[in-house]
Image: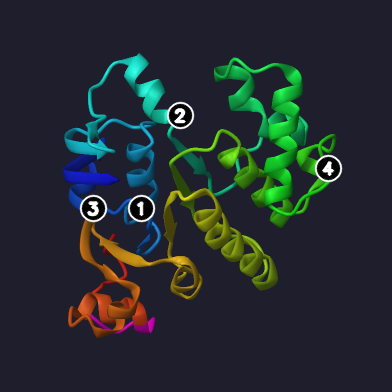
Amino acid sequence: MIEIHNLYKKFGSQEVLRGVELNIERSSTHAIIGRSGCGKSVLLKHIIGLLQPDRGDIFIGGVNIVGIGEKEKKDIRLKISMVFQESALFDFLNVEENVGFVLQRYFPWDRKEIKERVRESLEMVGLYHIEKKYPKELSGGMKKRVAIARAIAFRPRVILYDEPTAGIDPIGADVINSLIVRLHDQLAITSVVVSHDLENVRKVADTISMMLGGRIIYSGRKDDLSLCHDERVKQFVSGSRQGPISAQEV
């Protein structure tokens, strides 16, 4: 579903992506793990087209999205959705308006159709009768679920999750993990989960890649991660401060 080849990205003098190679199978749940600042979120923004690489290729369903025109880019974006780390809800819009935002902007649906799809999407994430509430009235976990409802509202083929359990309590994190698994099965989508939390990743992923220094240093089935002989991977899995990954390495 997603193929990334030799991807580079620099911001000023800082090279964040340094030749990323990654393949994500259709209908899988693939996790990208690594320390904070290693380039995981930047990679997601390239996949959804918010950033353009300095060099390299990104194929979505066989189509190279690097350098394509605005019309083609729009078509691709309507196949991919993203749940941002801080939920990224619009404070000035209520829940119904937030979840229906993309539908109102890009789909030729009438108000009744949009309202029905919003209701369906909220029910799919376990939220009922909160359409008129505003983000400031919601808990952190509820904001995450509203953001997921917005992401699934137009029924994309791919959903990208950027640190989906960050900033919420363990019970709330389990709710989000269960949602990721259930929506993946229910909607038959490809899911990509970025996180530094290995415990949560193991609850949702089929396959895992690890980033370090702007590169992918491991890709494989989650059950094989603990069998990897790369000392850098072993250090991350064990959570040890002692090993080949220095405190300064990103």
Q: Mark 4 or mark 3, which has the lower sequence index?
A: 3
Q: Is residue 7 left or right of residue 194?
A: left
Identified at 58% across, 26% down, the residue is 102
Residue position for label 2: 78
Q: Which residue is mark 3?
A: 23
Residue that appears at 18% across and 83% down: 229
Q: Are marks 4 and 3 in contact (CB under 8 Å)?
A: no
Q: CA distance from mark 4 to mark 3?
A: 39 Å
Q: For this rendering, which residue is in front, 186 or 40?
A: 186
Q: Amino acid at mark 3?
A: Asn
The three-letter code of the residue at mark 4 reads Ile
Give the distance between the C-alpha atoms of the residues marked 3 and 1, in whole angstroms: 15 Å
What is the distance, in whole Å, between disc 3 and disc 2 at their CAs? 21 Å
Q: Residues within 10 Å of mark 3 (few under 14, many from 20)?
A: some
User: Dot 3 lies on which element?
Assistant: strand
Going from the N terminus, do you reach mark 3 or mark 1 first?
Answer: 3
Badge nearest the viewer, 3 or 1 = 3
* Quadrant of the rendered image containing residue 55: top left
Q: Amino acid at mark 2?
A: Leu
Magenta residues (range):
238-244
Are the residues flagged by discs 4 and 1 in contact, CB closer than 8 Å? Answer: no
